[in-house]
Image (cartoon, rainbow, N blue to C red):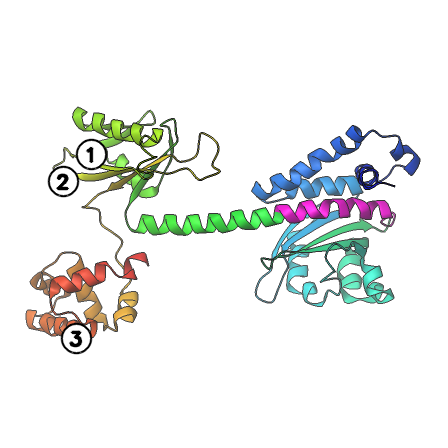
Amino acid sequence: MPRSQTTLMAAREAAHPDMAVSEIAQLTASEAFQSLDSLVGAIYDGALSTPPWKEAMAMVQDRLGAEHVTLMLRPPSPESNGVMINTGETTQQATDSYATRFSSIDPFVRLEEGEVVTAEEMVGKEWLNSTVYTEYLKPLGIRHLLGADLYTKDGVECRLRITRTNDDDTFTEGDRDFVRFLLPHLKRAIQLHTKLDLLETERQLFAGTINRMLLGIISYDEQGNIIETNEEARRILSEKDGIWLAHDALRLDRVKEERELHRIIRRACSGEGQEQSPAMVDAIAVTRPSGRATLGVLVKTVPAGEYSEGKYRPAAVVYLRDPEANAAQPSHELVRRLFGLTRMEATLALLLTEGLTLDEAAEEMNVRRNTARTHLRSIFCKTGVTRQTMLVRLLLNSVIRLG
């Protein structure tokens, strides 16, 4: 039989595992492939869902008439209970019991990739006498267990386990073909999920760092619509001191400043001049009626990637900086460990970075000025600086602000 016909037949059997071969042969190609479309789509959509693949596993359960379908995205280990997506009637107690006890003695693991087998086929007759079966699965009414494992080059190991009860039939070759048909799609979706998860982890890391640096960020799409604002930007805008948000647009107290800012934002969003300057940068100072120091506002284009598509990607970003914002005080312990200071020395160093004079710091610490000077000389010796301004610059430019 030609390869195309073999593929079509496999798809028909996978879509209708309970039909006789003669009936399957009568199905059209459209009927066979359309019946799998929603399931394959759910597998790829699962990479973006929370929890991932819950819907897809429920569809597999329904197609196979299974009691449970479990996808172990991260199998349990001595260090972790792992991550498992379960369908069917399950209890947290049963899940925890497997993760904490039975997973370590489960012989039905580390299957060859692409292999779809039952526990009895892999383990042999000993399976029905194993502790996992007699003390865990049998009390739950489970008799039949079908499994397949997936491995990626990124070190991901996933286990797919499908169960049936004592009253159900054993798994057929058609059932296995159905699972084999899905495995390549599931593996690709898992690889996509791994990459997306890495990107999201990096995004959260960078977002947290930017927030600790007290840098407000507002992102715009190509149409000039605001996509997102971070925590510091929302804080600055909520004060309504010279700049605020109204009807999804930035408003400024001074009309001239507002017009200039909007002109710069429109230019950045449109990509004007990107051929000559891919990263257009412009800035404006915003006057605050309260009399506080002016806000620094910087606007920058976000150049599109070579294969970027869609109109709602970030096209421009607005950075806001409040020079009078009070950053979270760095940990004394971090300062001590980084520069080898004592508790009193770390306290003095941090007070100086806040802009206090030596006399003011001594008063804050409730020590004499000469005592503070002694601590300062010790700090100079340990950090290698010779002036107070150099010390402040050293601390402000160090990693302690990231803690």
Q: Position of residue 172 (x, y in %)?
A: 86, 48
- Quadrant where the C terminus sits is bottom left
Q: Is residue 162 above or below residue 240?
A: below
Q: Which residue is mark 2?
A: 292
Which quadrant would the N terminus be assigned to in this image?
Answer: top right
Q: Residue furthest front?
A: 276
Which residue in the structure is indicated by mark 3? 381
* The magenta stretch spans residue 279: no
* Neighbourhood count class around disc 2 (C-alpha, 10 Å): few under 14, some 14–19, many 20 upward: few
Rendered position, 377 above or below 355? below
**Amino acid on which disc 2 is placed:** Arg
List x then y, in percent, for residue 49.
58, 41
Q: Is residue 185 magenta?
A: yes
Compare marks 2 and 3 and give the one earlier in the sequence.
Answer: 2
Q: Which residues are magenta?
A: 169-189
Element at badge 2? loop
Q: Could you say which disc has been placed on residue 241 in the image? A: 1
Residue type (three-letter) at the residue carrying disc 1: Asp
Q: Nearer the viewer, mark 2 or mark 3?
A: 3
Mark closest to the chain's N terminus, 2 or 1: 1
Is mark 2 in CB contact (under 8 Å) with mark 1?
yes
